[in-house]
């Protein structure tokens, strides 16, 4: 019995000319990368994303170095890279943590919505009133307090309940200059009042005014991961996948 000799494998020809090399590079490297970007970027723009939190304006709920999940389909679907709605199916509610654009400079912010269209909001000595009803305050659980790194300032922690939604807040000594009082203000159509949970060290609607619904990018309810910037970016494993009240 005679065996056929195996056919020699054809070796891939390497590009010989500059033109062939460019075509090879575009086909093998640029094209796959472009396809990935064409899928990934619109997904992040319109469906879901994560947002790095560089400041402490939402402490003690969110701390510096947290990366939070942003649900961009929470309120509707937008055309990627625009503020144009394709469809809407929900509206932001009191107490929700949202990612939005600052009306002052367009910078991306993470804040809590404390008042919605039609609400009258007031602040008296750091006590929040919505439609004439003061929020209720109580002690904060120790686990949330322990997430904050100690410093020289004496912090005051509390839980705040508005319309049945309870979340943590943090205040600083009276020596720190802050907006602790605000005359009654009624929100118009499509206007939302956003504040940081770190009440005395947050730049929010008290300084730049209400946020329009079109500037709200999405809703957040989870810390995906957290890195300690003051400790060589070591992971804070106890904050991974932490639910945000």
Image (cartoon, rainbow, N blue to C red):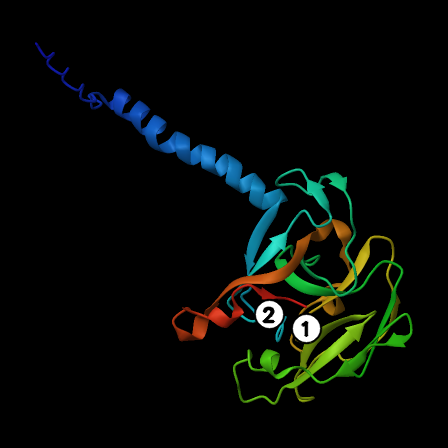
- Residue for badge 1: 197
Name of the residue lying farthest toward the left: 2
- Counting from the top left corner in percent of width and height, residue 13 is at 20, 21
- Counting from the top left corner in percent of width and height, residue 95 is at 75, 65
**Vertical arrangement, residue 88 with respect to residue 32, above or below:** below
**Vertical arrangement, residue 51 with respect to residue 161, above or below:** above
The answer to which of 244 and 98 lies nearer the viewer is 244
Q: Is residue 239 left or right of residue 211?
A: left
Name of the residue lying farthest toward the top: 2
- Counting from the top left corner in percent of width and height, residue 72 is at 65, 49
Q: Secondary structure at mark 1?
A: loop
Q: Is residue 160 left or right of residue 223?
A: right
- Residue for badge 2: 62
Residue in view at x 82 percent, y 77 percent? 135
Quarter occupied by residue 32: top left
Name of the residue lying farthest toward the right: 132
CA neighbours of label 1 inside 10 A, class few (<14), some (14 to 19), many (20+): many
Quick check: marks 1 and 2 in contact, CB under 8 Å?
Answer: yes
In the drawing, what numbered circle is on residue 44? none
The quadrant of the image that shows the N terminus is top left
The answer to which of 222 and 203 lies nearer the viewer is 222
Residue in view at x 69 percent, y 88 percent? 174
Give the CA separation, mark 1 to mark 2.
9 Å
Q: Evaluate whether residue 178 shows in this view.
A: yes
Residue in view at x 10 percent, y 14 percent? 5
């Amino acid at each position: 019995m005679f065996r056929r000799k195996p056919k020699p494998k054809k070796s891939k020809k390497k590009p010989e000319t500059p033109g062939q090399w460019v075509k090879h590079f575009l086909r093998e490297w640029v094209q796959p990368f472009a396809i990935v970007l064409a899928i990934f970027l619109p997904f992040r723009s319109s469906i879901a994303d994560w947002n790095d939190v560089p400041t402490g304006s939402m402490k003690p709920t969110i701390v510096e170095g947290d990366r939070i999940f942003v649900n961009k389909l929470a309120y509707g679907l937008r055309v990627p890279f625009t503020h144009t709605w394709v469809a809407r199916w929900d509206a932001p509610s009191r107490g929700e943590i949202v990612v939005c654009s600052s009306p002052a400079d367009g910078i991306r912010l993470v804040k809590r919505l404390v008042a919605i269209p039609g609400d009258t909001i007031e602040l008296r000595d750091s006590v929040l009133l919505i439609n004439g009803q003061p929020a209720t305050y109580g002690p904060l659980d120790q686990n949330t307090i322990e997430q904050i790194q100690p410093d020289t300032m004496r912090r005051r922690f509390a839980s705040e309940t508005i319309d049945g939604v309870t979340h943590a807040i943090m205040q600083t000594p009276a020596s720190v200059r802050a907006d602790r009082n605000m005359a009654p203000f009624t929100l118009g159509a499509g206007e939302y009042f956003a504040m940081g949970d770190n009440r005395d060290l947050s730049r929010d609607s008290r300084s730049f005014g209400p946020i329009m619904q079109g500037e709200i990018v999405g809703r957040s309810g989870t810390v995906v991961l957290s890195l300690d910037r003051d400790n060589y970016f070591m992971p804070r494993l106890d904050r991974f996948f932490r639910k945000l009240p």
